[in-house]
Amino acid sequence: MWVKLCCLLLYFLALFVLARVFEAVAWYESGFLATQLVDPVALSFRKLRTILECRGLGHSGLPEKKDVRELVEKSGDLMEGELYSALKEEEASESVSSTNFSGEMHFYELVEDTKDGIWLVQVIANDRSPLVGKVHWEKMVKKVSRFGIRTGTFNCSSDPRYCRRRGWLKSTLIMSVPQTNTSKGKVMLKEYSGRRVEVEHIFKWITAHAASRIKTISSSQHLKEEWNGSERYRLKIYLFASLDQPPAFFSALSVKFTGRVEFIFVNVENWDNKSYMAEIGVYKTPSYILRTPEGIYRYGNHTGEFLSLRAMDSFLRSLQPEVNDLFVLSLVLVNLMAWMDLFITQGATIKRFVVLISTLGTYNSLLIISWLPVLGFLQLPYLDSFYEYSLKLFRYSNTTTLASWVRADWMFYSSHPALFLSTYLGHGLLIDYFEKKRRRNNNTDEVNANNLEWLSSLWDWYTSYLFHPIASFQHFPFDSDWDEDPDLFLERLAFPDLWLHPLIPTDYIKNLPMWRFKCLGARSEEEMLETLPDSESDSDSESKEVFSSDKDISEDDELSTFQRHSEGEPRCRAETCPCAGKYCHREPGERRARSYGSYGSAGDAEPDWSAWPSAMLRCTECVVCLENFAEGCLLMGLPCGHVFHQNCIVMWLAGGRHCCPVCRWASYKTKQPYTHPQPLANDAPS
C-alpha cells in the first residue's frame, strides 16, 4: 500500500511539473502568461460577446462594440487564461443531454427534491406543440448548462393526471429554484409568462429570478450595517460593481452554495461617497471580496482565479467543502492508487487484472467501511469546535499561492482528460519497467511467467483449498503432489475420507528442537580413521574431508539444506550425510553398508543423555529408517517426546503426515513434557 501511495504522490508531482512546463512553453511562444490581464479594447466584437456569454451577462440590446466592451470592464478584469478557456468552450461542439421525464415520481425525485440546483423544464401539453422549438431549445440547453442549470422535458401524454392537477393545460416553461437561503430548503416552481420565446429573453428571465435570491446593497449606509452586522455565515463573498444585476455565474453559485456561503451584490453605480469602501479595503470596482473570520481575500489576484462558474466553484469548494466533496476526493485518490497495482504486479497479464480487481474491491470496501464511523463521529453535538478548527485549516491552506496552482492544474487536466489518462499510463509503464528490472536483478521467476503457467498455479492453489479444509490462515507455499503422481487424484476420489485431511503449514518444523547425538568416551573421527587399513584410508580421504567439514555445519544450515532438497535436488548424499550412509535416503529395497564398520553404533558406548532436551524420550534408534543413531548425527524431537533423524522426520512431516510416526500425536501441537523418573537413594546402581 505504501509503495502505491508513493507512486501516486510521484505522479502528482510529475503533473505539477508538467503544468509548469506547459506554462513556460506558452509564454515562450505567445509572450504572455495565463494570469496576465487583457485589454478589452484590443479584442474583437466576437470575442467580447463570448466573454459576456461565459460570464452570464445579456448583450442583446448592445449593438455597438463600445457598449459591449464597457459591459465587460464593469463585470471584472479579464485574464488571458479566461479568454482562452472561453474561446475553447465556444469552439467545442458538445451536445448537452436533456432529461425526459417519464411521470410524476420521476419529476419529483429530480426537480422538486433537488435543494441545491436550478432546473428549467419544458412542459408539452396534450396534443399541443412545445413552446420553444427544437432548434431554439437546443441552443437554450447549451447556454444554461454553462452555469450548472439542468434541463428537461415533461410530456403530459405520459402522465395527464399530474398535468391537470398542476394546471399545465398548455405548453409552458417551468423553472425550479430553492425558496429559502437554508441548505436543503423547499423548492418553488415558477412559470414563464413572457410572450417572446427567444433564447435571450428566456435567459434574462432565468437570471433575474436567480439574482433575486442574492442580497443587494445600494447605499454606503446599508453596506456599513451589513459589514458590521452579525455574522450568520462564516464566509461572505461581495461583488462591488456598477451593474444592474450580478452575472449569471455569480447567481448560480449562490444557489449551489446555499447555507454555506452568503453572496452579496453591492451596486455602486449611483454612489457619490465611496469613502467607506476604502475603509474596508476596497479601492477599485469591480472587485470580488471574500470575507472570512481571518480577514478578507481578493479573488482574482492568483493563478486560475477566473470570473467563471467553474473557477469560482472550485475555489469555494476548497474553502468550504461538504462531506460529500471529501468522500468523492478520497474515492478518486483510492482508486488511482489501486490502479497502480496493474503496473506494480509482475507476471502474466491475467494475473495483473485478477490482482487489480481484488485490490479495487478491497480498497473501496475499506474506504466505505472507514467512512461510516467518520460520518457518525461528525454528527456528535460536541464537535463544533473541532469542525470550526478544521474549516479554519482549510481556509488558511487553500488561500495560498500553492493552492491556487493546484486548483488551476486541476481545472486544466479535468478539461483535458486524454492528457490526464496518457500521463497516468506513461507513469504506470515507467513503474512497470523499473519494477521488472528490479525483480530480474533479484532472480525472480514470476517475471517470465505466462498466462497458462499462472492459471495452472492458480488452479493448484484453488484445488488445494477446495479439497483440504483450511487449518490456518497463514500464508505458506504449497507444492501439490499431483504434479508428480496424477493417480493421487483418482485415489482421493476412491477414498472420500482422505479429502478431510487438513492443510497444515510447515513453518512449525523450524521451531522443533534439534541437537547432535554424542556418546560417552567415543573416539574422535581422526583417531578412528587412523585405525583403518591404508587401502581404506586412501580411498576414503575425500570422505574424511567432507565429513569433517560437515561436522561444523549449524542447525540452520541443515534445515536450509533440506529445504533445497525438498524443491527437487537430491535429498542426501552418502559422502556428506552426517550419518555416513547408514540412515540416508534409500531407494525401496536398497540397503547401504556401513562405511566405517562398527563406528558409532549405540552398543559401543553409552549415549550422552545430558545433551538431550529434558522433554525428549531416550532412545538409540530411528523408527523411520530403522537405523541406530551414529556419533555426531543430527536429531530432531517432536512435541510428544519421540526422537528421530532430522532428515527422516522432516521428510515425513513435509510429505503431509503431520503426526508422530510412533504415537500419532499432532506434530504442531504442544504436549505435557515428559519427565524422566529420578532413581531412589536406596536403589543400587545397575
Image (spheres, rainbow, N blue to C red):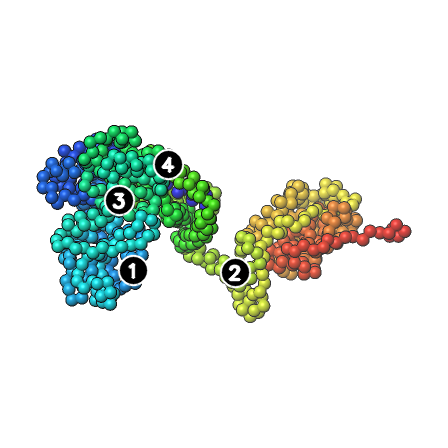
Q: Residues within 10 Å of mark 2 (few under 14, many from 20)?
A: few
- N-terminal of the pair, mark 3 or mark 1, is 1
Residue 526 lies in what quarter of the image?
top right
Q: CA distance from mark 4 to mark 2?
A: 62 Å
Residue corresponding to mark 3? 214
Residue corresponding to mark 4? 293
Q: Residue 359 at what x, y percent from top left?
A: 43, 51
Q: CA distance from mark 2 to mark 3?
A: 66 Å
Q: As displayed, is residue 5 above or below residue 221?
A: below
- Are the residues flagged by discs 4 and 2 in contact, CB closer than 8 Å? no
Q: Residues within 10 Å of mark 1 (few under 14, many from 20)?
A: few
Q: Is label 4 or label 2 in front?
A: 4
- N-terminal of the pair, mark 1 or mark 2, is 1
Amino acid found under the numbered disc labelled 4: Pro
The reply to whether residue 77 is visible in this rendering is no
- Are the residues flagged by discs 2 and 3 in contact, CB closer than 8 Å? no
Residue lying furthest left: 63
* Foreground residue among 152 and 207: 207
Kindly identify the residue that appears in the image at 58 percent across and 50 percent down: 563
